[in-house]
């Protein structure tokens, strides 16, 4: 019997999505019952050698699936934490952003005060020397982006806007992490205790800022009000709106962003395409659910979302025509949602815990539809909600390894899996 959740079970979960509290209770009870029936006698199976990145007995993780922790010199970014990651992040406990060399030796360690367990501090390489990340500036009492140079062994730039996604050393896109903390705390920061009660800025004054890396100049490129002008519906008027998950195209000329609005406890997603220079918007997906996306190439988006026919699955979207094409292999649909990371014709993706609490890791070809199973990893019940640990897989620069986060040992750790030839 398959330990994956069936189409009927996922359809039922979709229906319950209108009742979030009921869905959470039902999900916990059902998951525990299914685990007792499907529990396996191992916690990990993998096709190749596994290497962990850690310091002493501390936990480690990289964060989101859209950025590789590795640069082309084989240096690896990671977060190190002495705080148990089964607990919510705390403004009173900093974590460390570190760099490991090719021999898994620590060469840089920087304390960071703005983070979450899903994305860390949004650390990302700008080139082989400089990486950028978010932090909390106590003097400014605000979130900032810091650029650090390995060569200079020091911070080389500081910006009064936190980074969401960056394009090399040209520019980055920023968003309001205070709004995220109110509406989606999984990806927000906890340094402002009053954030939950603070009034949100108007839709005209909040959105996405473009920040020039060299001059530091910033401008509101796309407002939430702008997003609401694209194929507007009456529901917009009574909804609460936010942006999340900005992803810049490989050319740097465009980016995608999720426009999510909430009506009570009901959540509706749209995927927007923006011109990185003018902010001009177009609508790519308006079927109600967008989960995780990635640029497959300069004109194609790969993502798990709802598409034509109200079908949830992996879809390819042509950004010029907004035409949807389903991924060729149905095996991924059987696993449900995942986090695709593309390199060339291939992508890695993962699954949420199945009935046996195993998360699956897969390597797929988005052109041919080929799917290879790379491993499965146990995810305990103590990691849940904001403290969950998705694998968030990312291919290495040379495509010969996969980096991912896992709690199969009981502690959150960053791993590298070497792929077979």
Image (spheres, rainbow, N blue to C red):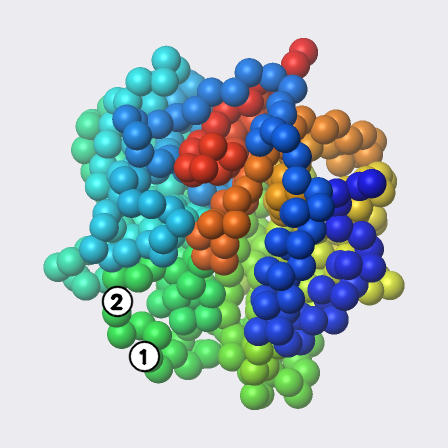
- Of callouts 2 and 1, which one flags the residue occurring earlier in the amino acid sequence? 2
Q: Quadrant of the N terminus?
A: top right
Q: Residue furthest front?
A: 36
Secondary structure beneath dot 1 equals: loop
Question: Looking at the image, which is closer to me, 305 or 41?
Answer: 41
Reading the image, the residue beneath label 1 is 198
Count residues near mark 2 (Cα–Cα under 10 Å), then give few for <14, some for 14-19, many for 20+.
some
Residue 414 vertical position relative to residue 206 in the rendered view, above or below: above
Question: Looking at the image, which is closer to me, 272 or 270?
Answer: 270
Residue 398 vertical position relative to residue 327 in the rendered view, above or below: above
Question: Is residue 321 something one can see in this rendering?
Answer: no
Q: Position of residue 345 (x, y in %)?
A: 71, 30
Q: Position of residue 337 (x, y in %)?
A: 68, 50
Residue 283 lies in quadrant: bottom right
Q: Is residue 387 left or right of residue 365?
A: left
| Residue shown at 68% from the left, 83% from the top | 233
Q: Position of residue 24 (x, y in %)?
A: 59, 66
Reading the image, the residue beneath label 2 is 192
Q: Is residue 196 left or right of residue 254?
A: left
| Residue shown at 67% from the left, 11% from the top | 421
Residue 235 vertical position relative to residue 167 in the rendered view, above or below: below
Q: Position of residue 149 (x, y in %)?
A: 26, 31
| Residue shown at 58% from the left, 31% from the top | 43
């Amino acid at each position: 019997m398959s330990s994956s959740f069936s189409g009927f079970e996922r359809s039922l979960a979709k229906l319950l999505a209108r009742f979030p509290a009921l869905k959470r209770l039902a999900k916990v009870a059902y998951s525990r019952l299914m685990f007792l029936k499907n529990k396996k006698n191992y916690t990990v199976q993998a096709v190749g050698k596994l290497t962990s990145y850690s310091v002493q007995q501390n936990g480690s993780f990289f964060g989101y699936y859209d950025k590789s922790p590795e640069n082309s010199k084989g240096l690896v970014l990671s977060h190190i934490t002495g705080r148990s990651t089964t607990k919510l992040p705390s403004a009173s406990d900093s974590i460390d952003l570190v760099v490991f060399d090719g021999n898994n030796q620590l060469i840089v360690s920087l304390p960071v005060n703005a983070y979450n367990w899903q994305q860390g501090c949004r650390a990302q390489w700008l080139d082989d020397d400089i990486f950028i990340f978010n932090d909390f500036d106590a003097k400014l009492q605000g979130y900032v982006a810091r650029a650090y140079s390995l060569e200079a062994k020091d911070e080389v730039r500081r910006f009064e806007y936190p980074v969401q996604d960056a394009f090399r050393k040209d520019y980055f896109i920023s968003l309001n992490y205070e709004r995220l903390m109110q509406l989606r705390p999984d990806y927000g920061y906890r340094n402002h205790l009053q954030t939950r009660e603070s009034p949100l800025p108007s839709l005209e004054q909040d959105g996405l800022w473009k920040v020039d890396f060299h001059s530091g100049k910033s401008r509101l490129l796309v407002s939430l009000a702008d997003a609401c002008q694209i194929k507007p519906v009456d529901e917009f008027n009574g909804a609460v709106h936010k942006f999340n998950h900005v992803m810049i195209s490989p050319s740097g000329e465009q980016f995608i962003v999720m426009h999510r609005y909430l009506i009570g406890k009901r959540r509706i997603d749209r995927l927007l395409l923006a011109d990185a220079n003018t902010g001009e918007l177009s609508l790519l997906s308006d079927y109600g659910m967008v989960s995780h996306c990635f640029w497959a190439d300069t004109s194609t988006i790969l993502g798990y979302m709802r598409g034509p026919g109200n079908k949830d699955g992996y879809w390819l979207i042509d950004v010029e025509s907004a035409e949807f094409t389903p991924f060729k292999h149905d095996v991924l649909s059987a696993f449900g949602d995942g986090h695709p990371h593309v390199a060339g014709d291939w992508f890695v993706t993962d699954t949420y815990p199945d009935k046996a609490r195993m998360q699956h890791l897969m390597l797929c070809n988005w052109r041919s539809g080929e799917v290879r199973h790379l491993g499965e990893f146990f995810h305990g019940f103590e990691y849940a909600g904001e403290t969950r640990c998705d694998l968030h897989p990312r291919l290495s620069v040379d495509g010969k390894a996969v980096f991912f986060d896992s709690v199969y040992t009981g502690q959150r750790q960053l791993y590298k899996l070497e792929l077979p030839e």
